[in-house]
């Protein structure tokens, strides 16, 4: 059981930690009555943070049970997607690249 958090590739590193923290909380609050969320929050709540480009971001927005986050420091643009935890995610999630710092301040 894990939560996927997708962050846009051009978000400055210094904002990623705060955005992803907000994403996990926003996702929990949106889906706190969901059975998968209840199981996740009462167990080992794994999170996977991945980097995506604009086209991928738009495709993943069509998935179900997600929260879209915006960032005021970046002109209120959409920067992150957080998905309600599940036991199994579709194959497309398996091909995402894990986020790593880019030193892009």
Image: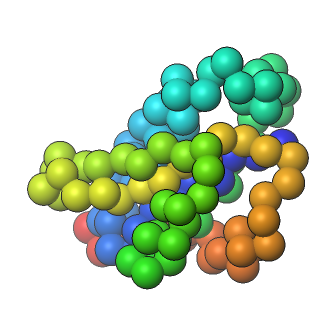
Question: Whole-percent x and y of residue 46?
Answer: 75, 43
- Count of marks overlaid on the render: 0
Question: Whole-percent x and y of residue 43?
Answer: 84, 26
Question: Whole-percent x and y of residue 17?
Answer: 43, 49
**Which residue appears farthest toward the left when viewing the image?**
75
Left or right of residue 95: residue 81: left
Task: Inspect this view and state whether residue 19 appears.
Answer: yes
Left or right of residue 72: residue 42: right
Compared to residue 54, the image places residue 64 above or below, namely above
At x 79%, y 45%, the residue is 86
Q: Which of the 4 image quadrants contains residue 32?
A: top right
Task: Inspect this view and state whether residue 49 appears.
Answer: no
Compared to residue 94, the image places residue 71 above or below, namely above
Instruction: Tell me the quadrant of the picture where the N terminus can be found.
Output: top right
Left or right of residue 18: residue 60: right
At x 68%, y 46%, the residue is 3
Compared to residue 70, the image places residue 7 above or below, namely below
Question: Whole-percent x and y of residue 75?
Answer: 13, 56
Left or right of residue 51: residue 44: right
At x 79%, y 58%, the residue is 89
């Amino acid at each position: 059981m894990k939560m996927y958090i997708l962050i846009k590739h051009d978000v400055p590193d210094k904002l990623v930690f705060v955005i992803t923290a907000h994403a996990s909380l926003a996702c929990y609050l949106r889906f706190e009555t969901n059975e998968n969320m209840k199981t996740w929050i009462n167990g080992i709540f794994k999170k996977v943070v991945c980097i995506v480009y604009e086209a991928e971001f738009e495709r993943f927005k069509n998935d179900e049970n997600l929260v879209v986050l915006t960032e005021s420091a970046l002109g209120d643009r959409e920067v992150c997607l957080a998905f309600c935890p599940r036991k199994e995610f579709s194959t497309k999630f398996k091909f995402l690249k894990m986020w790593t710092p880019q030193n892009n301040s």
